[in-house]
Image: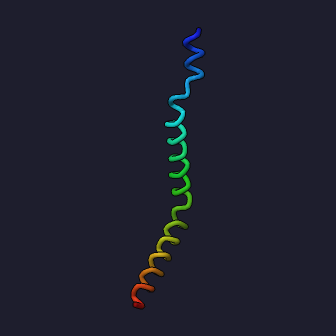
Amino acid sequence: MKGFQEFLTEEDGMGTVEIILIIVVLVGLVLIFKEQLTSIVESIFSKITKQTNKF
């Protein structure tokens, strides 16, 4: 019984689980807002290209 209680209080793997959950949430957000992110990035690169061609 003592070994089971130690298992429940052990927190060694918590960092890994938290990082995996954060990555899953970020990937989900990218998939949801893919079109908006693509249009923003394209507009930024087109502005950069236009401004570098001026000089």
Residue at point 59%, 22% (across, down): 9
Looking at this view, name the residue that lies furthest to the top.
1
Looking at this view, name the residue that lies furthest to the bottom.
54
7 shown above or below 19: above
47 shown above or below 54: above
Residue at point 60%, 15% (across, down): 5
Q: Quadrant of the C terminus?
A: bottom left
Question: Does residue 28 appear left or right of residue 50 in this picture?
Answer: right
Residue at point 45%, 85% (across, down): 51
Location of residue 6 in the rendering, given as x and y in whole percent from the top left corner: 57, 17
- Tally of marks: 0
45 shown above or below 37: below
Q: How is the image coloured?
A: rainbow
Q: Nearer the viewer, residue 3 or 33?
A: 3
Location of residue 28 in the rendering, given as x and y in whole percent from the top left corner: 54, 51
Location of residue 19 in the rendering, given as x and y in whole percent from the top left corner: 51, 42
Q: Quadrant of the N terminus?
A: top right
Quadrant of residue 45 in the image?
A: bottom left
28 shown above or below 53: above
Residue at point 49%, 75% (across, down): 44
